[in-house]
Image (cartoon, helix red, strand yellow):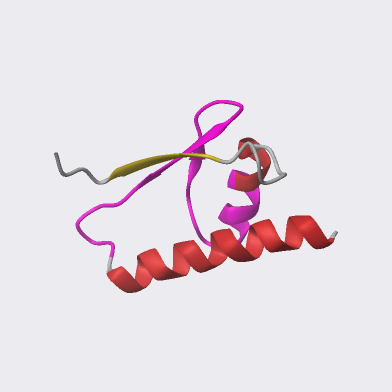
Amino acid sequence: MATNIVVFDVSGIGPAPAELSAKLKQRGVLMNAINERQMRAVTHYDVTRADCAHALEALAATIAAAHTS
């Protein structure tokens, strides 16, 4: 079944989902914490592949920054 929703576990990467969500928002990316372990990303028709690539880059950079501070 195709879907535009991705739920993923971030419990092993360091920052809590709510903190990660707030930091991503500062980078212009909206992903929501749905509980203490998971985040949810949703795309819409107006979201391009480039937008998705930007979101992934922001996620990777945010996680990397959390490990260096």
Position of 16 with respect to 4 (left or right) is right
**Residue 44 sits above or below residue 53 on the image:** above
**Residue 52 coordinates in the image, percent (x, y):** 37, 64
Q: Residue furthest bottom?
A: 50
Residue farthest along the top direction in this orientation: 35
* Residue drawn where x is 25% and y is 46% of the image: 4
- What is the count of numbered marks? 0
Q: Is 22 contained in the magenta span?
A: yes
Which residue is rendered at x = 57% and y = 53% of the image?
Answer: 25
Rendered residue at 78%/57% (across/down): 67
Residue 6 x %, y %: 36, 43
Extreme right residue here? Answer: 69
Q: Which of the image's four quarters has the C terminus?
A: bottom right
Residue 27 higher or lower than 17, as above or below: below
For this view, does 9 lie left or right of residue 7? Answer: right
Q: Report if residue 45 lies within the magenta region.
A: yes
Write the start and end of the magenta stretch as one range. Answer: 21-47
x then y, percent, for residue 65: 74, 62
The residue furthest left is 1
Residue 15 lies left or right of residue 57; in this view the side is: right
Q: Position of residue 64 (x, y in %)?
A: 70, 62
* Quadrant location, the N terminus: top left
- Write the residue at 65% across / 53% down: 23
Q: Quadrant of residue 14?
A: top right
